[in-house]
Amino acid sequence: MNRSLFLGGIPRTMSRRGFLRACAIATAAMGLPMEMVPKVAEAASDPKRPSVVWLQFQECTGCSESLLRASHPDIATLILDLISLDYHETLMAAAGEQAEQNLDNAIKRGNYILVVEGGIPLKDGGIYCKIAGKTAVEIVKEAAEKALAIITIGTCSSFGGIQAANPNPTGAVGVSEIIKDKPIVKVPGCPPNPHNFLATVLYFLTFKKLPPTDVHGRPLFAYGRKIHDHCERRPHFDEGRYVEQFGDVGHRLGYCLYKVGCKGPETYSNCPVIRFNDVEVWPVSVGNGCYGCTEPHFWDTMTPFHKRLPNVKIPGAGKGIQASATEVGKVALGVTAAALAIHAGVGVAKRLATGSKSEE
């Protein structure tokens, strides 16, 4: 069974196996058991699934570019098979008045998922970002009115992004600062991993609701743990082995990048697990520290990027897990002995209380 796809007039095909593989990747990203793959696939192929309207404002188009670089599934599958995209000004063939008419038609039909890429300026009436004579504020309010839900893709639409960095001259904000009456889920990152976005959409299609989120509105399946907790360089951190400067011996040996600015201990994301571009890499794996780009206002809170965070307690060289294994073992044995003594004491007390000479 093949599914015919068209991108820019060029037919593409995707096998049933490829389709199921895409659904399996999204299912795993959501933290769901593999038994859910058929249900996710059913939701993804349902002809009644809602369409997607994708708006772009103050941004670099990096989030869309990350989708273009995605594979397994590729961009054609993402857009034309799994998420029925009705409007995306960068990828659609239409331009000018025809493109705006497409947007108007999609909004009138309603019942779509609204995806927003880019920050939204509020200063001076929002004049710093206008499309077809309308400000970004006007466009997002109009589009949100008939949307089923909103997904903000990237840190710009989620938290304001680089244009919101101090002193924020255009008064840029994320969508949630403007729209208060619609469910919003944020998929931040600069750029975010395409699979996190796809999994968020498919979660909505499968369960008819947005996924559980953290206090910042990010899906827990993707942003529920710190990068530091599942980083492949974590054993080096625990053992006190650090890169002291880029290019040194520790850097070449793959030691922890914390001392040269890695923000992994304060950043929530699944980057070490999902990785990017189907080649199993992410910034830390290729020797550059995490910049904390999934966090609110990271341009202000995480800079300078190559200086260590001040409040993270680190083990010194020779004071890691291996060095203290003997001490830990002694403590563990001591605790066990104490616990056995307490248990024995309780047993004696019970026998005295009941007058029994023995107890099962």
Image: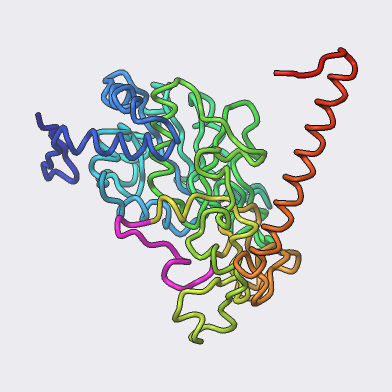
Q: Is residue 31 left or right of residue 216?
A: left
Look at the image and tell me whether residue 39 can be seen.
yes
Looking at the image, how many numbered discs can be counted on the residues? 0
Q: How is the image coloured?
A: rainbow
Residue 313, how many percent across, how many down? Answer: 73, 65
Q: Residue furthest front?
A: 357
Check if residue 91 falls in the magenta segment. no
Q: Residue furthest bottom?
A: 248
Which quarter of the figure has residue 214?
A: top right
Question: What residue appears at the point 67 percent right and 39 percent down from the top-left corner?
Answer: 215
The dominant secondary structure in magenta is loop
Q: Against 27, is 191 above or below?
A: below
Question: What residue appears at the point 82 percent right and 36 percent down from the top-left corner?
Answer: 342
Question: What residue appears at the point 78 percent right and 32 percent down from the top-left corner?
Answer: 343
Q: Nearer the viewer, residue 20 or 314?
A: 314
Q: Dividing the image into 4 quarters, which one contains the N terminus?
A: top left
Q: Nearer the viewer, residue 17 or 4?
A: 17
Q: Against 186, is 292 above or below?
A: below
Q: Which residues are magenta?
A: 276-289
Q: Against 63, is 287 above or below?
A: below
Q: Dividing the image into 4 quarters, which one contains the C terminus?
A: top right
Residue 124, how many percent across, how many down? Answer: 68, 52
Question: What residue appears at the point 72 percent right and 45 percent down from the top-left corner?
Answer: 336
Q: Nearer the viewer, residue 52 or 106?
A: 52
Q: Is residue 137 left or right of residue 339?
A: left
Which quarter of the figure has residue 136?
A: top right
Residue 177, how many percent across, how many down? Answer: 66, 40
Look at the image and tell me whether residue 118 can be seen.
no
Q: Nearer the viewer, residue 317 or 135?
A: 317
Which quarter of the figure has residue 77?
A: top left
Check if residue 281 falls in the magenta segment. yes
